[in-house]
Amino acid sequence: MTRYVFITGGVVSSLGKGLASAALGALLQSRGYTVRLRKLDPYLNVDPGTMSPFEHGEVYVTDDGAETDLDLGHYERFTGVAARKSDSISSGKIYSQVLEKERRGKYLGETIQVIPHVTNEIKDFIACGDGEVDFMLCEIGGTVGDIEGLPFFEAIRQFSQERQPRQCIFLHLTLVPFIESCNELKTKPTQHSVKELRSIGISPDILVCRSQGPLPEKVREKISLFCNVSPGAVVSAPDLSSIYEAPVAYHEEGLDGAVIDAFGIDPAPRPDLSRWNDVTERMNNAEGSVRVAVVGKYTELGDAYKSIDEALSHGGIANRVKVSAKWIQAEIFESEDPSLHLEGVHAILIPGGFGVRGSEGKICAAKFARHKLVPFFGICFGMQMAVIEAARNLAGLDDAGSEEFDHDRSEGGEARKSFSRVVFHLKQWEQDGETQSRKPDDLKGGTMRLGAYSASLSHGSRVADIYRATEISERHRHRYEVDVKYKALLEKHGLSFSGMSPDGKLPEIVEISNHPWFIGVQFHPELKSRPFEPHPLFADFIRAAKEQSRLV
């Protein structure tokens, strides 16, 4: 029997529901249980795929090609359980499904309403895979009181009523702010949040209280009294120096014990936290530090490159070094000398992105790394910019560019500037034995090359040595590809195509052999990196940065 934990939030957003959910999943795993985590988002977008990174942070991609909320990245990083399309839903998706059924006559002429039709669709989503795991953790996005979230709160209320006793519990995350002027922690926001939750029929079993520091016992007792939960179910969640301290910290505060007690599990298996103790020990006892410049388009918002940031820290864990990321806006290099910002860094990374803005700056950064022999990692768009730089400055294609640039610069259907399209719009490819086709003017959202694809690595290449394999599978998210017709010319001038799609039509990895570390990949390796299992490319990239730090 699968037990369900519904995680909700109150007072303000961005308190860390995703992190708390992921840490709880890790703690339940440490006791020998199987888990799966899900995210229910109230926004009306069908998925985050078309949302700006400035709006919503990065888009996390699953193996089966779902574009999801970045919290699914936390879930995977903490539990190692690969997320699926069935682990992420939004109001937009729910309403689309309901309306599609109505158009097809599935409701037999009924009047379509939020209750029961929308709430039933939500409950069906929650129940998908029932019985597969011991615990299903379902996080509801937003905060209690948001009008968009009401159907989700009503659905989980109904769901809990329809299940057996003690098969569902509610965990509510709130804020206990510290008011400096009166030197006091204030519990009133938590009380009001719980009151709001109760007004829609949900009584929390556990309260996780975010604060700057640990909650004093008197504050816990006050929250327990006014919110009608047992003192042991009031869990303190103070600020931490690293998110990877969360599993151990939450265990010490009694979160997993409170969950076990709420379900009435007795006796409960003892937790084994050795994996997380090792991670925190490595982070707290770093033997040096490295500086990595991340030259991107959305660097003003940290969440836009969340998985990149975490994968860099995982590489640091693997090498026992602290990684300090220097976030640089790519457009700066279109007017300033790159050396003003890149001298002294130990490695350079260019992440993914879309559109022409900042592209020339990224090309300048790739050129700097190649000339100055600084370890370089290009990911997705970053790989494409490295290829264009090599085409211009090594192979003599002065007008090398991307079809994406032509589309972005067009006016009235006519391009302002024509390029040698080293990178072109991907119009057709194979997926699971079927031919996929796309046109530049297709509807946006889910129309890219998405999800896990295989690649074949060249024997003796650097990447084959790093992976210790010649066949790999990685996650993709892009519309444009490097044109294979330039392969021979670029390899003649030193840029090796060391990874290709199995049919040999699509370049997956490029590298320069006579460089300390210069690799570009068309996929997103950061999506599969874990603190206890760093991605091999990030682990080796930081190893190279560590070597570089000894030379600078």
Image: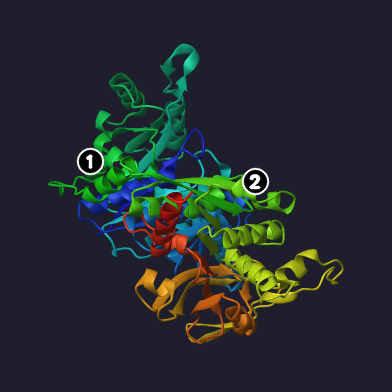
Quick one: label 2, few (<14), some, or many (20+) residues within 10 Å?
few
Question: Which quadrant of the structure image shows residue 83?
Answer: bottom left
Residue drawn at point x = 26 percent, y = 43 percent:
256
Residue drawn at point x = 30 percent, y = 41 percent:
285
Answer with mark 2 or mark 1, whichever residue precedes in sequence.
1
Q: Nearer the viewer, mark 2 or mark 1?
A: 2
Quick one: label 1, few (<14), some, or many (20+) residues within 10 Å?
many
Place of residue 261 in the rendered image (x, y in percent of width and height, measured from the top left): 21, 41
Marks 2/1: CA–CA distance:
53 Å
Residue drawn at point x = 39 percent, y = 57 percent:
543
The foreground one among 215 and 531 is 531
Place of residue 82 in the rendered image (x, y in percent of width and height, measured from the top left): 38, 64
Specify the label residue 257 is tagged with: 1
* Mark 1 residue element: helix
**Which residue type does callout 1 highlight?**
Gly
**Which residue type does callout 2 highlight?**
Leu
| Residue tagged 2 | 340
* Mark 2 residue element: helix
